[in-house]
Image (cartoon, rainbow, N blue to C red):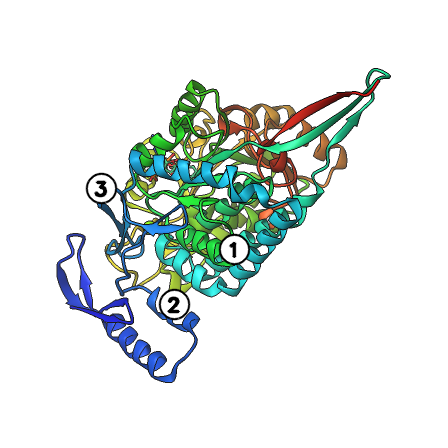
Amino acid sequence: MVIRLNGIVVSSSVKDNAGNITAFSKRGLQQICYAFCYFSTGSHRSHLSQSFTQQGSRMDPYKMLIGGEHRAAFSQQTLDVISPVDGMVFTTIPRGQEQDVDQAVAAARTAFNGQWKGFDALSRGRLLLKLSRAILDHQEELAQLESRDTGKPLSTARVDIKVLARYVEFYGTAADKVLGEVIPYLNDYAVQVIREPLGVTAHIIPWNYPAQIFGRSVAPALAMGNATVIKPAEDASLSILRIAGLALEVGFPAGVINVVTGLGEEAGAALSAHPGINFLSFTGSGEVGVLVQQATALNAVKCVLELGGKSAHVVFDDADTDRAAATIVKGIVHNAGQTCSAGSRVLLHESIFDVFMDKLKHEFSATCVGTPEMDLISGPVINKKQFDRVRGYIERGRELGLTVAAQGKIAQGVPAGGYYVTPTLFVGDDHRCELMQEEIFGPVLVVVPFADEADAIRLANDTDYGLVGAVWTENGGRQLRMAKAIEAGQVFVNGFGAGGGVELPFGGVKRSGHGREKGLVALEEMSTTKTIVIYHG
Ligand code: NAP
Ligand code: MG
């Protein structure tokens, strides 16, 4: 049964993946009651958004945003949006394809050559600051939406939205501080180097931190005056559609931000191969990263690739072990381990192996995953594919003879159809084994011992990846030697993650990708220089 109030669909029934009613949901009925309360008392719309984004209700179908219009796909086809919390379909998104991408790129080009050109750096910055404010004003609505779409705990989603707002603020305040150069040259000449936008920038965004990565990737592009086309992951498009809608509301001209939803191999592939784009920012798997790099290369288009990692914590015998153990466990279980920069390997000095393992086991056993409303350290993984994949790695670890040192718990009462994975701590001795070498992207941590500093460096770099590293030691000389020796784009000493680190240049070496996002360097990545040489006699 579906009840519609002021255009918002409220379902009191539970449906299976085929859309058949299988049971009546208590929460669905509660939401109808809430809805009537709010309508009858005339409460603020943000309350409505909150109640309608909780589990159990079905939401109106979503539309894409192209050229300032909320639209269905050209083909009229849609994709089901499935909640990782219970495996149920709760809305749909348009299945954008080549024609939709064509229209989005054309809309971006029109905006870039037209109205958007009239916005100088200060005006673009102010618009971004307005958007940052609007995001904070809608923080609860966006967090509920993000949480519902991805299964994240509500507190995690709230932090993600704050970080998104901070990205937009950071690049808003930076927009008018990008300076050019004056170069001494021949006596009769004046030379200026100015920064210009690239044109139409494309942004392919994954499902692990959709709102945050929108901020990281799109905000610097806008600050520099580019017009953008975004392809979110099919599993996490909703917050990005809403943020793009907010941008339109605060005054971004139509066509400056376009969002094409759909499948990676359709909309994503069409966008990366489109001759009308001038830049591509891609975050996701190494396999797809290589495909999009090939596609952009055929059009001589620059791309930045952020492809994940297998980042190591190196724990020496003089480390603050309590702090290290708590940080390491939180880092790998948070967001169900679906963090490109997660520290998923621990290299542990053999002299403190047993003592530190006890602390890790203690921390790991205390972890518990559940629904967003339970608000534990983590929720489910994003989809059935990841569920099978991560559980497959845990099974493989056992087959390979690794020891399961500790496991967390899945909370009682989670819905049967959800994608909950038990956090698992392994101990091994072969650093070449699959679990030490491959990005699992789940709450799985593997520990191996090392003998001395040289051994630690060898193991830390014995990986195809190079995104982040961490060193835990109180010895100052060793801190710097290790930080310099670890092959990675970021190295933390006695810490990890640095709370979002919007200001800190981020990106990989080796198979973790190339190019940099975050910090001021992103403004350089998403713009180009022009050298103007003036003969004045
Ligand atoms: P993925 O396929 O690389 O997805 C990343 C993005 O690329 C999504 O927006 C996806 O859209 C899009 N995409 C997929 N195929 C494409 C194609 N042929 N051309 C252009 N775009 C395409 O990642 P996944 O399959 O969802 O996850 C698999 C593994 O990737 C994970 O287990 C993890 O190891 C890694 N991963 C890393 C990150 C990271 O932050 N570095 C993020 C996510 C995943 P659709 O989702 O709609 O297909
Ligand atoms: Mg989803």
Quarter of the image for residue 141 reads bottom left
Residue type indicated by callout 3:
Ser
Compute the Cα span from label 3 to label 2: 29 Å
Q: Along the polypeptide, which appears first: circle 2 or circle 1?
A: 2
426 or 496: nearer the viewer: 496
- Crowding at mark 2 (Cα within 10 Å: few <14, some 14-19, many 20+): some
Looking at the image, the residue that sits furthest to the right is 187
- Amino acid type shown at disc 2: Ser
Q: Which badge, 3 or 2, is on the more N-terminal residue? A: 2
Q: Can you say which quadrant of the picture contains the C terminus? A: top right
The residues bearing labels 2 and 1 have C-alpha atoms spaced at a distance of 22 Å
Q: Which residue is mark 2?
A: 49
Q: Secondary structure at mark 2?
A: helix
Circle number at residue 403? none
Residue occupying the far top of the picture: 186
The answer to whether residue 219 is left or right of residue 16 is: right
Badge 1: residue crowd in 10 Å (few <14, some 14–19, many ≥20): few
- Residue nearest the observer in this picture, 23 or 170: 170
Place of residue 379 in the rendered image (x, y in percent of width and height, measured from the top left) = 39, 55
* Mark 3 or 1, nearer chain start: 3
Residue at 48 percent across and 63 percent down: it is 138
Residue 354 visible from this viewpoint: no
- Which residue corresponds to mark 1? 251
Badge 3 vs badge 2, beta-carbon distance below 8 Å: no
Image height of 495 relative to 296, above or below: below
Q: Which secondary structure lies at badge 1?
A: loop
Q: Which mark is residue 75?
A: 3
Q: Which mark is nearer the camera, 3 or 2? A: 3
Whether label 2 lies within 8 Å of ligand 2 gets the answer: no
